Image (cartoon, helix red, strand yellow):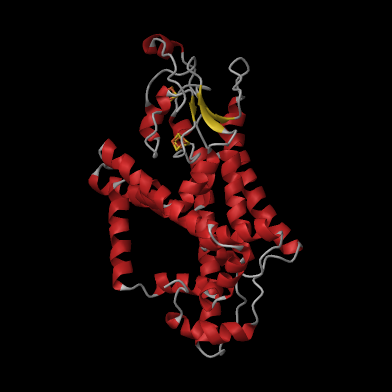
Amino acid sequence: MAPLAKRSSAREKKSLVRRSAPDRSQPIRHLVQWLFVALNLWIGLQFLLWARYFEHGETGLYVSRPSGVEGWLPIAGLMNTKYLLLTGRVPTIHPAAMYLFLGFVLTSLLMKKAFCSWLCPVGTISENLWKLGRFAVGRSFRLPRWLDVALRSLKYLLLSLFVLVIGSMSAEMLAGFMSTPYGIIADVKMLDFFRNPRLTGAIVMALLVLFSLLIRNFWCRYLCPYGALLGLASLLSPLKIRRDAQACIDCGKCSRACPAQLPVDRLVQVRSVECSACLACVASCPAENALQFALPPRRSAAPTLRWYRRVVGPIALTGILAYIFFGIILWARVTGHWQTNIPREVYARLVPHANQVSHPGL
Ligand code: SF4
Ligand code: SF4
C-alpha cells in the first residue's frame, strides 16, 4: 500500500471543489463485459455443436472446433507457456490457450487486473450476483478482517500448487501430458463439467452462487488462482488508480464504491493486487481530477482534460484491451499457430467416450 496522504480540511475544500463531469466508464465497461459474455456464449454454442457431432457418430451438422474455447483452459495455457520457454517451439495442442493466457498476463502488466473486471465472464457473473444479492437483501456482507485475510490466501495456495506441479515438469513431460487422451480433450471435459455436473460439483457450484450473492466478488477475491496470478503481474503495471490529495474532498465515496474494499480515499496510488481497474472509484468521485487511472507521475499542475478523463480514458482502456486481445489472436492465426493440430479421427475416437477419460495423474 502507498503511504497515507495528508488530508486537508474537507470542509474548506468542499467549498472550493470543482464538480467533475458525468463519468462514462461504467456503462462502457458493462457493455464490454456483456459483449465478451456474448462472445463466450457464441464460442460455447459452436463447441457444443462440434462435440455433439462426434457424440452422434459423426452425423448431423459439422461445425469446426472454435479455438477460442481454449481460453477456458488456463492450466493448459500455463503448461504451454512453459513448453514454449523451454523449447522455443509453439505447442501443437491447445496453442490458443497459451496465446490467450499470455495476452491476459500482458494486460495485467500494463493496466492492472483489467481482464477480471472488463473481460472475464466469471468476473461479470460474480459482479452481477453480488449486485443482485445487494438488491435482494439491501446490502453486501463483509467478512471479519482475520477471516478475509485467511481466505484471500486460498487463491495463492491454489496458484502455488499449479506452479509447483507445472514447474517440476520437463518439456517432454509437458508434451506427453498434452498428448494423453485427457490432455487432448480437456476442453470436452470442461464442457461436461458444466453440462453434466456430478453431485459434488453441483453442491460446490450452488455454494459458490450463494456466497457470491452475499459477498462481493467471492470467487475472484478468495478462490480464483488465475486472478491471483494476474494480480501479482499487475504489481508491475504503470497504470494505477492515483489520487490527488489536493483535489480530493475526503468524501470517501471512492472507498465505498470499491468492490475490492480498498481504502482508496486514504491512498495516493492503489498498488494492491486486488485492484481490477474497474474504475468504479473514479466513476463515483465528485471532485474534478481527484482520482484517475493514470501513468506516473501524475501531473497535478496540468490536470488531464475533462473530456479525456471521462470519455476517452475508458474508451482508450477498452481499445488497448481489444488491441491486445485481437492482436494476439491475429498474430497466432497469421503465423499458423492458432488451431490445435489433432486429426479428426482422434476426436471421433475420444469425444464420445469423454466420460471414461480420466486425468493421467489419477
Ligand atoms: S481501487 Fe478503484 S479501480 Fe481498483 S478495484 Fe477499487 S474501485 Fe476498482
Ligand atoms: S471520491 Fe475519493 S478521491 Fe474523490 S473526492 Fe471523494 S474521497 Fe477524494
Residue shown at the point (53%, 59%) measured from the top left: 168
Left or right of residue 258, residue 20 in this image: right
Left or right of residue 61, residue 219 in this image: left
User: Which image quarter is the C terminus in?
Assistant: bottom left
Q: Quadrant of residue 261?
A: top left
Residue shown at the point (46%, 70%) measured from the top left: 190
Residue shown at the point (44%, 77%) measured from the top left: 358
**Depth check, front residue: 215 or 138:** 215
Tell how many labels. 0
**Depth check, front residue: 209 or 99:** 99
Give coordinates of residue 258: x percent, y percent: 40, 35
User: Which image quarter is the N terminus in?
Assistant: top left
Give coordinates of residue 20: x percent, y percent: 50, 24
The image quadrant where one finds ligand 1 is top left
**Depth check, front residue: 311 or 123:** 123
Residue shown at the point (49%, 85%) measured from the top left: 352
Give coordinates of residue 266: x percent, y percent: 41, 23
Compared to residue 59, the image places residue 299 above or below, namely above
Compared to residue 93, the image places residue 108 above or below, namely above
Residue extending farthest to the left is 137
* Any part of residue 29 in sight: no
Q: Quadrant of residue 125?
A: bottom left
* Any part of residue 157 in sight: yes
Q: Quadrant of residue 347?
A: bottom right
Compared to residue 340, the image places residue 301 above or below, namely above
Give coordinates of residue 311: x percent, y percent: 58, 35
